[in-house]
Image: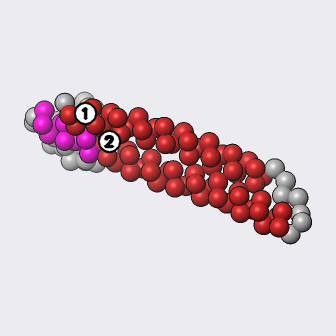
Amino acid sequence: MALISCSKCGNRFSSQLPACPVCKLDPRGADPAQLKKAALRAFRTRIYHLNMWSYLALTICTAGFIWFWSASRHGQDAGVIPWGLIGIGAGGYLLIRLLMIRAKLIYRKTSRA
């Protein structure tokens, strides 16, 4: 009994199982069209997850802005925490968008091949 890696999700499972328990792909009887379809599905899932992370980064940036705005509106010093939240949120958003662009380019290249 050996452990094999799934070509779709990367999960390691026993060679005695008929298919991957996570994504249900049969690595032994998979034709190239099925493998391509599985790879495209994995890219779509990755793009979806990156999109959700970008929403989180925007929320962090917005929270920092609201904190800064509300403190300055009441004449108080906001400190460095709001600026840190704005910086982390904006930097994270830009990084995630770059990763999304890269994933979309790979997705288009894979879907055309």
Q: Residues within 10 Å of mark 1 (few under 14, many from 20)?
A: some
- Image mark for residue 53: none
Q: Quadrant of the C terminus?
A: top left
The residue at which mark 2 appears reads as: 43
Drawn side of residue 21 relative to residue 90, left or right = left
Residue type, mark 2 in image: Phe
Who's the residue at 81% across and 50% down the image?
Answer: 80
| Rendered image quadrant of residue 71 | bottom right
The CA span between labels 1 and 2 is 9 Å
User: What is the span of residues highlighted in magenta in the rendered image?
Assistant: 32-41
Q: Secondary structure at mark 1?
A: helix
Q: Position of residue 39 (x, y in %)?
A: 25, 38
Callouts 1 and 2 close, C-beta under 8 Å: yes
Q: Position of residue 87 (x, y in %)?
A: 69, 45
Secondary structure, mark 2, is helix
Whether the magenta-drawn stretch holds residue 10 is answered as no
Residue 16 appearing in the image: no
